[in-house]
Image (cartoon, rainbow, N blue to C red):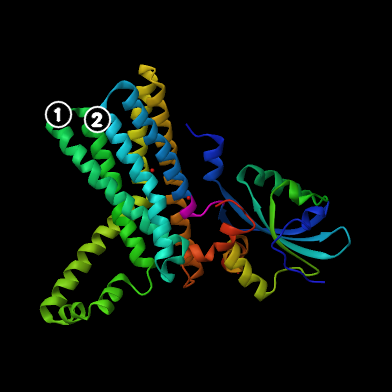
Amino acid sequence: MTSLSLDNSSFSSVPRVQVKKSTFSGYVPTSTSGELTDRSYVAQTSGTASMFFEGLVNGDIGTATTGLLNTIKNAGYFGSKKIFNNASVDNNVEGLASAKADTLTAGVGMASNSFQLVGAIASGDPTYLMSGILACGAYLIQTADGLREVCDKSKPSTMENLEKKFPFIGTVTNSTFGGAIKVAVKKTSDLVFKFAETAKDNNMDAAMLGIRAGGTLTVGVVTGNPLMIATGAGLSIGALIRAGSNIRKKYEKNMDVLVGGEDTEEEQFSGVHGETLGGHSLA
Amino acid sequence: MMTEEVKEELEIHLLEMVQMTIESGDSAWALMSISPEKYQDYKVKIETGDDLDINEYGRVLAYGVGETEPTPEENERLLEEFGYHPDLNMEEKLKKILEKGSG
């Protein structure tokens, strides 16, 4: 008479029950971090597309170009994720392809915003300066933490893969001089990764993008510019969902530590992602 | 500027392991996902001991009829599918700690 069912349709036909005992057993986010990352990029893409149209409508080539480049970058996340997904068997883990595509997109965002930051410094425009600082800071955190995540999730590690493909790397790193460099690189990267992880856990990247988006939204409302409002709203929603993704990642890490499983977090929650819960993750 | 859609996307639900008797008189268990908004109402309702429709309070993620709790094999599936683990049963843990403290 026993049955384990992961489909609640039959149980929903049981009208009334008498509860003998009911115990709190943890939390379950309704979306995976990968899905939240996807959704944040959808919102960000709509925001930067509005920026492109705003530039076109106002004949502002600079704004239009920035909007267009950022739209290409944000939309490119989905293309690169698909490529990473198909690249190899190792990348068939949903979380790994998302992490790689997110890291690449954040890296491109950091590079493109660095150029704008240099331009803002040269022109002395405080608004663009602040916007550039916030964007570069946020993308720096996302790129560094993304690299850490990719290294963590890749099995075998990226370094082991490189050493396998190019044996001379192993020879160099196993020498006294190479070993010293390896230790130094590891110590430095550990520091950077730790900083980025702490920043992500505290939602600093989402907060920086949110402040920048909020500024655009406020200027749009004050000046009555509907396209600027659309840009600010899209970017704000993207930043909010990014914050949700950070919370989810933190939850996954905590669950992994508590449960002590060897599987990746995304694998552990595959059922929540694909089956019963149905729900599942910017410029 | 948090729309309902965004709020829903960011939501985290509470996992509840429910042990009960169904209308046929059989014992059953169900792993439920309950939204924070409905959680307090649910807890108040079950304290009364009255019959209730648990579907009104949340979503039944998995269940078993004819048994009072999941078997070890079922627990493995619940862990894999929903992140549920009996060792994460916080109320039981708290009770044990309190019992140890008073003993």
In the image, residue A206 sits, relative to residue A61, either above or below, namely below
Chain under numbered label 1: A
Start-end of magenta stretch: A30-35
Identify which residue is drawn at 12% across, 33% down: A122
For mark 2, give the secondary structure. helix
Q: Residue furthest right?
A: B24
In the image, residue B59 sits, relative to residue A60, either above or below, namely below
Whether residue A36 is visible, yes or no, is yes
Quadrant assignment for the C terminus of chain A: top left
Residue A102: x and y, percent?
37, 53
Identify which residue is drawn at 38% across, 73% down: A155
Q: Quadrant of residue A41?
A: top left
Q: Amino acid at mark 1?
A: Gly
Residue A187: which disc?
Answer: none
Residue A50: x and y, percent?
39, 31
Name the residue tied to disc 1. Answer: A124
A10 or A248: nearer the viewer: A10
Name the residue tied to disc 2. Answer: A62
Quadrant assignment for the N terminus of chain A: bottom right
Q: Quadrant of residue A272?
A: bottom right
Identify which residue is drawn at 29% across, 59% down: A194
Q: Can marks 2 and 1 be said to lie on one chain?
A: yes
